[in-house]
């Protein structure tokens, strides 16, 4: 039987081609603070070795909060009729991009709710305009779409796409996403890989009914699909949703998931998500950055719209003006002995493939 000391498990997780699910669950089940500290320190060292000491920045613009979906945890879901909906104009979006480019940041993330009537040609036009005017990588995060839309946007110049699987437990997925299809989400995720996007996934920790085995399954999925980016954040209950009375995700479980994901995936880009910066009013992003994460996503959505992109309550920086994150992020990096990296931060997996 495989040795079950923590050090032996960590070494196996790092070295195995296909990690053992029981080892992942062992890491996720740690409760003793000293042992958790050992896990985080190990992941931090793997992060240093494989992605270095730079914290990559991605400037995010939440250009619309319209949504056709009914995700049970999400404040943007279409049944929330109390939310004022917005969509930024082309000019407003391009102004935000200019602000990001002027800050020296090499990547913009264009995010919105999953809106079935989003005009694919309109977005392709925006992508082309950005690529003509700025030397900046574009990540899209606008949900499930037909293959042809993804192809159109790739052709227009989009570099990356974030489509979180949210949970790989099919039953749990169906329960939390009535009217959506787990199989279609998987298909979309694979289509993005086929089209050559730098491909992002991720999950939510602490969804009602989610088990440690489910989270271990998520990590195996992330590793098996060789995602370039993986966003891991806690569930935060939104008062206007069916899950309003459910407890938030556990911060330590989020950190353990980030750490195990880092150890197994090695060079994936892992953000210290805004959700982990917002949990119970505390900013746990420094903890995430010292447990395996290497990316931050400063928000450039202008006011007053930023406050309306309320996927969960208490979202950090939602009342600040755009561009104010700079000093705050510099101090954060300094405090944990890291540096800010403004480069495009392309996939390290892709680079390796190109060199081969
Ligand atoms: N708590 C935490 N994360 C959430 N998301 C949506 N609603 C919530 C919530 N209540 C996350 C999903 C989605 C991303 C944009 O926000 O993972 O992919
Ligand atoms: Fe909007 Fe799920 S409810 S993406």
Image (cartoon, rainbow, N blue to C red):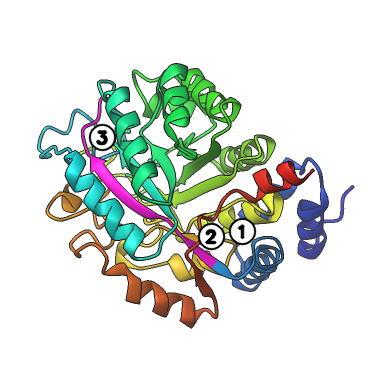
Residue linked to disc 2: 255
Point out the tag, 3 or 2, that comes first from the N-terminus. Answer: 3
Alpha carbon separation for disc pair 1 and 3: 31 Å
Alpha carbon separation for disc pair 2 and 1: 6 Å
Question: Could you tell whether 276 is left or right of 211 in the image?
Answer: left
Query: Which residue appears at 54% of the width and 76% of the height?
Result: 338
The quarter of the rendered structure image containing the C terminus is top right
Residue 204: percent from the left, percent from the top? 45, 44
Question: Could you tell whether 38 is left or right of 165 in the image?
Answer: right
Point out the tag, 1 or 3, that comes first from the N-terminus. Answer: 3
Residue 175: image quadrant is top left
The reply to whether the C-beta atoms of the residues labelled 2 and 1 are less than 8 Å apart is yes
Q: For mark 3, give the secondary structure.
A: loop
Query: Which residue appears at 27% of the width and 45% of the height?
Result: 62
Q: Is residue 66 shown in magenta? A: yes
Tag in front: 3 or 2: 2
Q: For mark 2, give the secondary structure.
A: helix
Residue 259 badge: 1
Residue extent of the magenta highlight: 55-71
Determine the residue located farthest toward the right in the rendered image: 1
Residue 223 in view (yes/no): yes
In this rendered view, identify the residue nearer to me: 274 or 282. 274
Residue 237 in view (yes/no): no
Residue linked to disc 3: 242
Q: Is residue 45 above or below residue 265?
A: below
Residue 83 badge: none
Residue 339: percent from the left, percent from the top? 52, 75
Q: Is residue 120 above or below residue 228?
A: above
Q: Residues within 10 Å of mark 3 (few under 14, many from 20)?
A: some
Q: For mark 1, give the secondary structure.
A: helix
């Amino acid at each position: 039987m495989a040795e079950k000391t923590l050090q032996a498990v960590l070494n196996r997780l790092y070295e195995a081609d296909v990690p053992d699910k029981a080892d992942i669950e062992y890491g996720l089940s740690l409760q003793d603070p000293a042992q958790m500290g050992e896990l985080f320190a190990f992941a931090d060292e793997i992060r240093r070795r494989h992605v270095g000491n730079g914290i990559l920045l991605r400037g995010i613009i939440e250009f619309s909060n319209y949504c056709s979906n009914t995700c049970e945890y999400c404040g943007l879901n279409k049944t929330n009729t109390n939310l004022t909906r917005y969509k930024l104009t082309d000019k407003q979006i391009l102004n935000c991009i200019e602000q990001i480019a002027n800050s020296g940041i090499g990547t913009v993330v264009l995010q919105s709710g999953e809106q079935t009537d989003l005009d694919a040609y309109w977005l392709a036009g925006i992508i082309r305009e950005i690529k003509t005017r700025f030397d900046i990588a574009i990540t899209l995060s606008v949900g499930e779409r037909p293959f042809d839309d993804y192809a159109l946007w790739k052709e227009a110049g989009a570099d990356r796409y974030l489509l979180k699987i949210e949970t790989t437990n099919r039953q749990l997925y169906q329960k939390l996403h009535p009217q959506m299809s787990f199989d279609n989400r998987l298909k979309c995720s694979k289509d993005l890989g086929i089209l050559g996007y730098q491909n992002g996934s991720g999950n939510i920790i602490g969804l009602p009914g989610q088990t440690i085995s489910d989270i271990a399954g998520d990590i195996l999925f992330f590793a098996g699909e060789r995602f370039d980016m993986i966003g891991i954040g806690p569930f935060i209950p939104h008062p206007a949703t069916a899950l309003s009375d459910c407890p938030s995700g556990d911060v330590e479980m989020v950190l353990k998931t980030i750490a195990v994901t880092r150890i197994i995936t090695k060079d994936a880009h892992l953000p210290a998500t805004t959700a982990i910066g917002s949990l119970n009013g505390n900013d746990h992003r420094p903890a995430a950055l010292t447990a395996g994460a290497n990316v931050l996503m400063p928000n450039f959505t202008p006011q007053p719209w930023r406050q309306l992109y309320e996927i969960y309550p208490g979202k950090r920086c939602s009342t600040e003006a755009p561009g104010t994150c700079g000093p705050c992020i510099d101090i954060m990096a300094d405090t944990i002995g890291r540096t800010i990296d403004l480069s495009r931060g392309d996939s390290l997996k892709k680079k390796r493939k190109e060199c081969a």
